[in-house]
Amino acid sequence: MLTNGQKMARAAFTAVKKVCAGGKYEDYKRFALSFPCLIHSCGLVQAATFADAKGQTKYLEGLQEVLQNVETGCSDDLVASAREADLKEYMRLSRRALEAAAWIKRCCESLDGAENGGPR
């Protein structure tokens, strides 16, 4: 039996590895390192809309994959789910998205450390 954190960690690692294999990792990593702070300061809807406007579709897809590994009640479109949710659901979804974004950030940091010969 896996905890929600373990499920998110596994899904985040898979999502980040897909981007590593496909190239454009540096841009993805730069965005992934700042996205949790963006959610915290602006809110989920504004942060996800900003990511969409900046063309960070791979990041949003990865975030969606991580969220779908834990029962969240959101549809396939994170931005629409957050925009249409009532306050209670929005707060829950925001907490889960922040947790998922933190796992993606950790995976990027760990892969970056592994490529550079260890932790920074």
Image (cartoon, grey):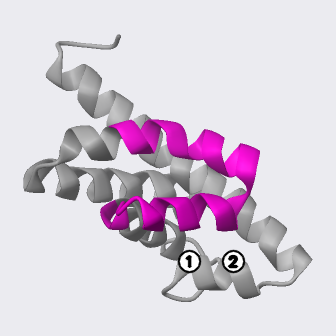
Q: Are marks 1 and 2 in contact (CB under 8 Å)?
A: yes
Q: Is residue 46 magenta?
A: yes
Residue at 89% over, 75% down = 88
Rate crowding at label 1 as few (under 14), some (14 to 19) or many (20 or more) other CA atoms within 10 Å. many
Task: Locate residue 27 relative to residue 8 in the image: left or right.
Answer: left
Residue 84, given in percent of the width and then of the height, sits at 74, 88
The C terminus appears in which quarter of the rendering?
Answer: top left
Rate crowding at label 2 as few (under 14), some (14 to 19) or many (20 or more) other CA atoms within 10 Å. many
Q: Nearer the viewer, residue 97 or 41?
A: 41
Task: Locate residue 88 relative to residue 8 in the image: left or right.
Answer: right
Give the residue at the far right of this rendering.
87
Task: Locate residue 57 relative to residue 3 in the image: left or right.
Answer: left
Kind of residue sitting beneath label 2: Ala
Task: Locate residue 22 relative to residue 10 in the image: left or right.
Answer: left
- Name above or below for residue 25 compared with residue 116: below
Name the residue beneath numbered marker 2.
Answer: 82
Name the residue beneath numbered marker 1.
Answer: 78
Whether residue 73 is visible: no
- Name above or below for residue 38 compared with residue 116: below
Residue at 27% over, 21% down = 113
Q: Nearer the viewer, residue 18 or 48?
A: 48
Residue 71, given in percent of the width and then of the height, sits at 61, 78
Please tell me whether mark 2 sits on a helix, a strand or a loop: helix
Residue at 86% over, 84% down = 86
Q: Determine the main secondary structure of the stretch shown in magenta.
A: helix
Q: Is residue 49 magenta?
A: yes
Q: In the drawing, what numbered circle is on residue 111?
A: none
Instruction: Give the residues drawn in magenta, as a range.
Output: 30-58
Residue 80, given in percent of the width and then of the height, sits at 61, 85
Kind of residue sitting beneath label 1: Leu
